[in-house]
Image (cartoon, rainbow, N blue to C red):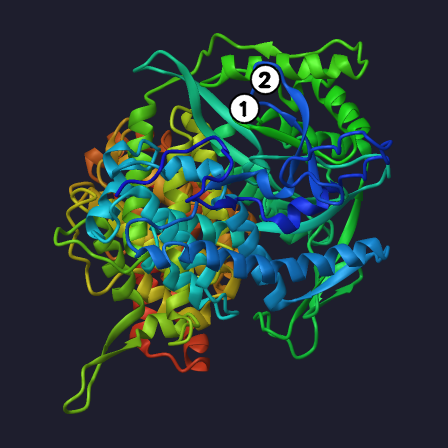
Amino acid sequence: MSHPKPNNMAPAASNGQYQHFVPQFLLKNFAHRVPKAPKAPKGTPKPKYEKGMFPGDLVISSLDMTQDAAAFTEKPVSRILGQINMYDDFITKPDKERRHVEKLLSRLEAQAAQIVTKVTKALEAKEPAVRLMWDERSLLRKFLFLMRYRNIVFYKRFHHENSTEYSDQDREQLREYMAENPQFKTPIDVWLNNIKTIVELEIDPEFKWAREIGKHMYPDDAQWFLYNLQCNTMAFCVPSNPEEEFILTDNSYTVSDEVQVFARNVRSDRIETLARAPFHEFVPVSPKLMIVLRSQYLSEPLEDNCPEVKARREAHRSLAFAGFGPVQSVLEDLPIGKPHNSHVKVVNGRLCLRDGEDGCQRRDHSYLFHFFSVESRHVNTINSILLDKCVHCTSLIFNSKDAFGKTLEWYLTAPLEYGKTLIGENADLREKILMKLEVISRSFGSKKETKWTRVNKCHVAADHEYSRLVDQQVRRDFNRLLSGKTDKKPLWIDGIRAAIDEGVEQPESSHEGTSPGFTPTPQYRMLGGSVHTVEKDKEQTLLMMTLRIKIDYWSRGVDEKIRQRNRDLLIAEYLRMPARRLWGYMRIVRYMYLSDSFFIPIRLKPEQPEDAVIYAKDLIEPNSLTYLIYKAVQFDIELRKRPHVDIWGELSPDSESMALMTELAFRVQGTESILNCGIPIIENLAASLVSQTPFAGMALGIWSRNPRNPNYHPSPSPDFESNLEASLSLFNILHRTELALRVICRTRFLGIMESERSKHNLHPQTLQDLKKVFFTAVYPTPPDDWRYRFW
């Protein structure tokens, strides 16, 4: 049986139920009661009232946008922002149970209504803030996401007879998901199951829900739900001017303050949206209360008092929006912040954990949400964003007609940075909407000039279909991994899982009659890992790689220097993370680089050069450990990609050896000079050598002619003399000095490090291995028989 087609908010039929996608408890906040009619003289016919419009009934004032000319109207709360049988399950449930999703939503609405009432009562009592417990905050966040996901916009997205009619960006993925789950006959079955899964989901402080949700619903939307809950800050905003109000539209809960990138589609020759960068989402609660979800990439007053936290956030923002250029939100200066958590305190303007707290969330924690008073410009900006996105809306809802007229005039006459740029797929329709709104604004008496612009040309061209398919492939593979599913074919994502598992887990000897378990590898334990951190670390390393892939994908077509800068910024951020996560991430990097392709996994060596660094970690400064691990893996990748290249072989300005040697020896982030190598004794030795006047002048002369060189020959060969001048020109004075420092430090390494080895009770072989990796991979140093001198 097919679903009934959308009926444009038609009134309920005798066999249908009008189901709201905006709950009535929220609509009532925008409603007023029908006044009693004045008493009519005797003999006058009694007034006739439509259903739901009797005196005392709650009604909504709105601007009806469904006709050619917009018109003001009033509708009962019970008959606006809804759809006939919207959440009915006609396929998978018998008739008696077909409204099970609607019933689940009703129960959730009842719970959310209690929390929202608690908030609105605090606001009405002029309290400066309201305190929510952990469970209340979690349920409210879940409800807010569902307000977005259950909306008419998503109903229309999924409302198709079969999967082949589904045409959204993720169409291949949804079709694959339905093929793997044949209980879903139509796309709307998937949507209803997603809603049911989220409603029934128990959000626990231990974050178990995040690891399980992808197994029970459509993975793409599961990841979106996870992102929405984890990467936005919730804040309560109220107008500072009592005469101003927030509005409500059909799609308010799906609207974002965002920057869009448009490009001419090389296949269709049409200007279409290529990408979006969201900053804020909006949840109108009442004319006097707007919940704003603010991106984690935007400023946060208390956190910005800590330079390290501010720098990390700005680095994340630069990377996340790399493909968009230097973008800003029109609400960048919105004066809101995070709630004050009960497990932290403010000391000298900075957030610190309270005594006895370890940073983990618990159910007995509470959150103090302040009511942020926002000025007229911000109220009008939020309303303008809603008006600018009302292309397919049927109703613009308001409380005060005067307040609506003023905010409408502000939107239509504000500078173009607040929207009204007609470009892309809906340009013609948006122009019609603007013309409708202009007529309404004139009816209020506005005489200001309406401003909008149309963009008909776009100099940026892109193959949108190719970009979409690449994005979907990345999403598909990572969703498979995070949902714990595998294919029969050895896709590259399976190799990534194997690379991670191989790094952090090893088989554990089993008792007779039991299955073997797993225990963390020695390397993982030495980096601070345990059985309690394995799952979280595996999840985080996957997210690190996901971001790395997305950064490259989002910046396709951008100047390569900018792309490389973005990669460097990302690595700089990753190098500040716990060493075990950086190590796990680099194992994925090595796997992906060294596969014959993304679909043919490699066989990794059991021992990697970074192991020598990890086993000797007690000799290394903690803040330098990640740099040394990173460099060791990078060197291993490059040398295994080019087994035929000897970086200390015949060097010439244009040779592959010279290019690779220069890159590995001097340009890898964080390991440019042995003066800052993270091993204090070696740093001190190098510093003392540089400070010596004779060293600066001769730097030990020609190493190849030094009697301490085991390959010393008193009479240099003719080849050496003839190539001497050419070799000198290949290095500047800084590089020659650096190489000389490395040669000397390598010569003295075992001797001066012996006391440290004994102090930390390390095996002699550990020091030998570290020396080999340190001067081969981390700080590449010329071999003893290298034929060219440094000066």
- Horizontal and vertical percent for residue 572? 49, 47
Q: Mark 2 and 1 residues: CB-CB less than 8 Å, in contact? A: yes
How many numbered marks have been drawn onto this rendered protein structure? 2
- Horizontal and vertical percent for residue 537? 40, 64
**In the shown orientation, is residue 500 left or right of residue 21?**
left
With respect to residue 110, does 74 lie above or below?
A: above
Residue 80 got which mark? none
Q: Judge the density around disc 2: few (<14), some (14-19), many (≥20) Cα neighbours within 10 Å.
A: many
- Horizontal and vertical percent for residue 270? 39, 13
User: Measuring 66% from the left and 20% from the top, which residue is drawn there?
Assistant: 71
Quadrant of residue 240 in the image? top right
User: Measuring 65% from the left and 41% from the top, which residue is drawn there?
Assistant: 52
The amino acid type of the residue labelled 2 equals: Ile
Residue highlighted by disc 1:
391
With respect to residue 1, does 770 lie above or below?
A: below
With respect to residue 279, does 302 lie above or below?
A: below
- Horizontal and vertical percent for residue 3? 33, 40
Q: CA distance from mark 2 to mark 1?
A: 7 Å
